[in-house]
C-alpha cells in the first residue's frame, strides 16, 4: 500500500537552505510535497528549484 506524501508548507520568508534542512530531517522513505505560496522567497528562481531537486535526490526523496 502506497503511503501519502508528507506536506511541507513553505513560509513566504523561508530561504532555500531552510527547505533543504527540512528535507534532510525527514526519514528516507518519506515522499515529500511542498506547498508554496506565490511569492515565496526560497523558490523565486529556476536555480533554486534545481538546487532543491538535487538535494531531494541526494536524500532519497
Image (spheres, grey):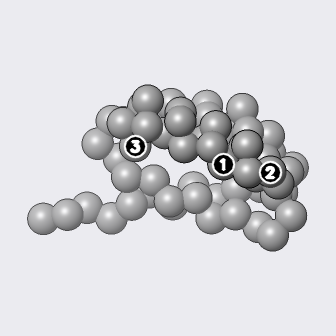
Q: Residues within 10 Å of mark 1 (few under 14, many from 20)?
A: few
Across and down, in percent, residue 30 comes to 35, 47
Q: Residues within 10 Å of mark 3 (few under 14, many from 20)?
A: some
Across and down, in percent, residue 3 comes to 25, 61
Across and down, in percent, residue 13 comes to 87, 49
Instruction: Decide which of tag 1 and tag 3 comes sooner along the chain.
Output: 1
Viewed as shown, does residue 54 lie left or right of 26?
A: right
Name the residue at 73% across, 51% down. Answer: 46
Across and down, in percent, residue 52 comes to 61, 41
Viewed as shown, does residue 51 lie left or right of 40?
A: left
Circles 2, 1 touching at the beta carbon (< 8 Å): yes
Name the residue at 50% across, 59% down. Answer: 33
Give the labeled residue for mark 1.
49
Viewed as shown, does residue 37 lie left or right of 4?
A: right
Name the residue at 82% across, 54% down. Answer: 44
Give the labeled residue for mark 2.
45
Which quadrant, please, contains the C terminus?
top left
Give the labeled residue for mark 3.
61
Amino acid at each position: 500500500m502506497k503511503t501519502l506524501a508528507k506536506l511541507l508548507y513553505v513560509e513566504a520568508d523561508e530561504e532555500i537552505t531552510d527547505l533543504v534542512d527540512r528535507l534532510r530531517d525527514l526519514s528516507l522513505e518519506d515522499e515529500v510535497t511542498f506547498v508554496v505560496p506565490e511569492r515565496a522567497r526560497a523558490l523565486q528562481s529556476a536555480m533554486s528549484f534545481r538546487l532543491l531537486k538535487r538535494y531531494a535526490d541526494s536524500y532519497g526523496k
